[in-house]
Amino acid sequence: MSKDTRKTAYPCDVCKKSFSRKDSLSIHKRTHTGEKPYRCGICGTSFFQNNHLTKHKRIHTGEKPYHCDICGKSFTLSGNLTAHRRIHTGEKPYDCDICGKSFSRSGNLTTHNRIHSDEKPYLCNTCGKSFSNGSALTKHKHIHAGEKPYRCDICGKSFTQTGSLTIHIRIHTGEKPYHCDTCDKSFSLHDQLTTHQRIHTGEKTLCLSYLWQIVLSKSTLD
């Protein structure tokens, strides 16, 4: 038997994928059977592999064995440390084949690709609205539940989305992070900056109320 043949000696009878070790094949088969023999004794969550259970248990124990040698921040998973280090190095190894935008995490690239494909796999069970990522669906569900988990520490006002809270806090702090490159005027909202920049570009837009006036006047004449 050749060296290359030995490497792929154990084929899966379901999908024909091959493995060099019998135990690797056994683990793989669980993806087809749904078997999850490794169960967390604390919360009951089950896993395909024992090492997945080991990583999961760190959520309960708070163990973070992977440390960043640059800033000292700690992580429960080695993959999270690898992704974190790219903040310091600026490395973005995952490139979009369509627009060329780069990302530090493969998951971020996957989410980004849905902009081009218009794929929205996360469905709201209440209203049927779909989203391209799970976090957007979670935020959306707060609307149906009436939940406002993001609370302003200054005035106590609550919001359904963390982004809305961030914008609100600028009322208290006076922060205006969006700057006009032409006149250096600053704004608290990106939309305000976009509207302002039309003064410099000469771009003209009709407001919705004015458009309705045109439609109504035309229908009256007809």
Image: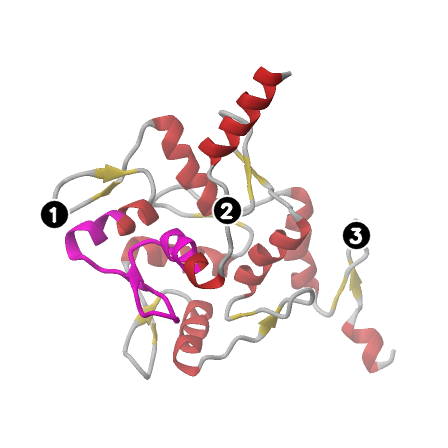
The quarter holding residue 221 reads: top right
Q: Which residues are magenta?
A: 168-197
Give the position of the C terminus as an image quadrant. Answer: top right
Mark 2 or mark 1, earlier in chain: 1
Give the position of the N terminus as an image quadrant. Answer: bottom right
Residue sitting at the far left: 154
Can residue 185 be seen in this snapshot?
yes
Numbered marks: total: 3
> What amino acid type is highlighted by mark number 2?
Thr
Q: CA distance from mark 1 to mark 3?
A: 57 Å
Give the mark toward the camera: 1 or 3: 1
- Left/right placement of residue 114 relative to residue 72 reads right
Measured as percent of width and height from the top left, residue 125 is found at: 52, 28
Measured as percent of width and height from the top left, residue 192 is found at: 36, 53
In the figure, 207 relative to 197: above or below? above
Q: Which residue is mark 3?
A: 15
SS category of the residue bearing label 3: loop
Label 2 near label 3: C-beta < 8 Å? Answer: no
Mark 2 Cα-neighbour bin, 10 Å: few <14, some 14–19, many ≥20 = few
- Examine the structure image and report whether residue 136 is included in the region drawn in magenta: no
Please tell me which residue is depicted at 43% across the width and 67% down the height of the picture. Answer: 80
Please tell me which residue is depicted at 28% across the width and 50% down the height of the picture. Answer: 167
Label 1 near label 2: C-beta < 8 Å? Answer: no
Identify the disc placed on residue 154: 1
Residue sitting at the far right: 1
Identify the disc placed on residue 205: 2
Can residue 125 be seen in this snapshot?
no
Mark 3 Cα-neighbour bin, 10 Å: few <14, some 14–19, many ≥20 = few
Give the mark toward the camera: 3 or 2: 2
Mark 1 Cα-neighbour bin, 10 Å: few <14, some 14–19, many ≥20 = few
